[in-house]
Image (cartoon, helix red, strand yellow):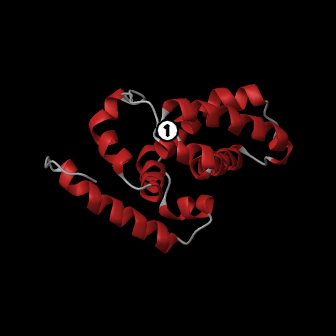
Amino acid sequence: MEYKITAADAFKKHSDMVYRLAVARVKNKYDADDILQEVFLRFIKHKDKVENDEHLKALLIRITINCSKSMLTSSWFKRTEPLSETLSVWDEYSDTLDAVLRLPQKYRTVIHMHYYMGYSVDEIAAILKSKPSTVKSQLHRARKMLKPYLEGETVNV
């Protein structure tokens, strides 16, 4: 049986996940909006290659990571200063989110995928195209950086 999904259905089902991951990576809701649009434009080009819903989700995560990486490494992004803003994307997680957003990008990504999206270490490694041991190390280091904050100490991550 062939898997078919429209771009509108994919957007309805996964746009929140893509947006949250984009915000976690770029730390800016306006850039995350641009990434969200770019992800689904790229998805439209490749939607015929999607095999099932899990493949779709992994594809959207991979595209989101690639788009955010492209944005973060662009010369335009490096030369600009973001407007100061309060991030209220996840009000229910705001205290913890503040600490997570202070982490270096590679740690933010694995923390977000593991705790907010519920992926296992092996699934994260497959999506990020890295080794499970690398993901485990990054999770361990990120938890170590977050531990003082989560225990109530004031810390600059």
Quadrant in the picture for residue 44 = top right
In the image as oriented, which residue stretches furthest toward the left?
Answer: 153
Decide which of 63, 50 is in the foreground and name it.
63
Residue 69 point in image, percent of width and height: 60, 52
Crowding around mark 1 (Cα neighbors within 10 Å: few <14, some 14 to 19, many 20+) is many
Split into 4 quadrants, where in the image is the C terminus? bottom left
- Residue at the image position 39 percent from the left and 28 percent from the top: 85
The kind of residue on which mark 1 rests is Val
Decide which of 11, 24 is in the foreground and name it.
24
- The image shows residue 122, relative to residue 108, as above or below, that is below
Number of marks present in the image shown: 1
In the image as oriented, which residue stretches furthest toward the front?
Answer: 79
Q: Is residue 1 visible?
A: no
Q: Is residue 1 left or right of residue 60?
A: right
Residue 80 point in image, percent of width and height: 52, 40
Q: Which residue is mark 1?
A: 23
- Residue at the image position 45 percent from the left and 53 percent from the top: 114
Kind of element beneath mark 1 = helix
Q: Is residue 151 left or right of residue 128?
A: left
Q: Is residue 134 left or right of residue 90?
A: right
- Residue at the image position 44 percent from the left and 30 percent from the top: 83
- Residue at the image position 63 percent from the left and 37 percent from the top: 35
- The image shows residue 74, relative to residue 143, as above or below, that is above
Residue 107 point in image, percent of width and height: 42, 57
Q: Is residue 114 visible?
A: yes
Split into 4 quadrants, where in the image is the N terminus? top right
Residue 11 point in image, percent of width and height: 68, 29
Q: Is residue 119 left or right of residue 87?
A: right
